[in-house]
Image (cartoon, rainbow, N blue to C red):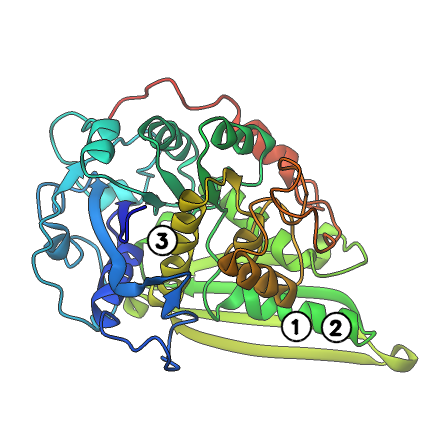
Amino acid sequence: MSQKVRVAVIGVGNCASSLVQGVEYYRHAEPGDFVPGLMHVDLGGYHISDIEFSAAFDIDKEKVGRDLGEAIGRGQNNTVTFATVGQLGVPVHRGMTHDGLGKYLSEVIEKAPGPTADIVRILKDTGTDVVVNYLPVGSEMATKWYAEQILEAGCAMVNCMPVFLAREDYWQERFRQHNLPIIGDDIKSQVGATIIHRVLARLFRERGVKLEHTYQLNFGGNTDFLNMLERERLVSKKISKTNSVLSQLDHPMAKEDVHIGPSDYVPWLRDRKWAHIRLEGRSFGDVPLNVDLKLEVHDSPNSAGIVIDAVRCCKLGLDRGLSGALEGPSAYFMKSPPIQVADPVARDLTEAFIAGRVGADCLSGRGPAGATGGPVAPALAPATNGASDGHGAELDRRAGAEATAGAGG
């Protein structure tokens, strides 16, 4: 059992920059202290300083061939700098493109020359434990291609993107077959638009207010929002965010009464994200009750603390010989986990996982007898796969064939 958590990143964008900076920034945090920005300084015996970056992959000419510590400040990256990161001794390798470079990103990013690196060999040679997927939204084929490389290399995976792996039976079984854990899908920021929206929707439900209409409008100035101007690429993102919020209700809502998703790209905001959230409902006596709020965050640092915990939970899964989706941490850290539960329940399950009281299948109880102690909490309606407005089938059609065959690099 290694006392380090060797982490590789796919996609050296703003989110990777915040993650790398965060490991440096909190390197000397005291385990017993409350440290702003962190949920766990020490997680299951792993301090933040135990995270080591082992490999990195990108296709941007400005980043490929550079040291990771330098690459996080190059190209279109525009997140806030809060830590000085020196040379890490980790080169950025040429990754696979597939569908990872959309129409608008291709106007500002020049692909690095040369062939795709031998991903499997690099992951094995560097002793990588956990691979973090930071590919752009809409990279369906690229994500699935990388998942196959990760399985072959024998690594755990944290899927931060809304390409559905951890919640799908096929991919859960693939990770079980390889005796590897996965946490996914689609990272839930520490205090972001989705978790605030979820909490408010849950509050309406628990206090007897019927939610009738709601929207969440998000805009920002990073390449994520530029990429999502290509509306075809954000189908899975809208499904993920919509299901995450609607999972907290016990009544259906019509498609036309819910709008949740990215809205526009405003370059001068850079890595800042502004979210406008509105909920309209009926309370006692059918009297209207409305909530209107605005959230302003630096988008990428808002997710980095979650990833720091997720990679350490994956390492605990490796240490304990667990495989498949880690259901408790996935429910807490991700928008589209295998099984949705209320956030306080997900937090309790994650703490129980860290303490070793539950295993991978703590909600479904699908693991071997005695491996998890059986289900410890009920799932919430609606169903975990497919949006209640019917968009899930549309995504399944779009995702179509598994991307194990090679597209051009």
Using residue 104 as the reference point, say whether residue 121 is left or right of it: left
- Amino acid type, label 1: Leu
Sequence-first tag of 3 and 2:
2
Pointer 3 residue: 224
**Residue nearest the observer in this picture, 202 or 236:** 202
- Amino acid type, label 3: Asp
Q: Quadrant of residue 200?
A: bottom right
The CA span between labels 2 and 1 is: 6 Å
Using residue 127 as the reference point, say whether residue 293 is left or right of it: right
Using residue 205 as the reference point, say whether residue 15 is left or right of it: left
Determine contact: label 3, label 1, CB under 8 Å: no
Q: Nearer the viewer, mark 3 or mark 1?
A: 1
Q: Which disc, if any, is residue 200?
A: 1
Sequence-first tag of 3 and 1:
1
Pointer 2 residue: 204
Residue at 60 percent across and 42 percent down: it is: 371
The CA span between labels 3 and 1 is: 26 Å
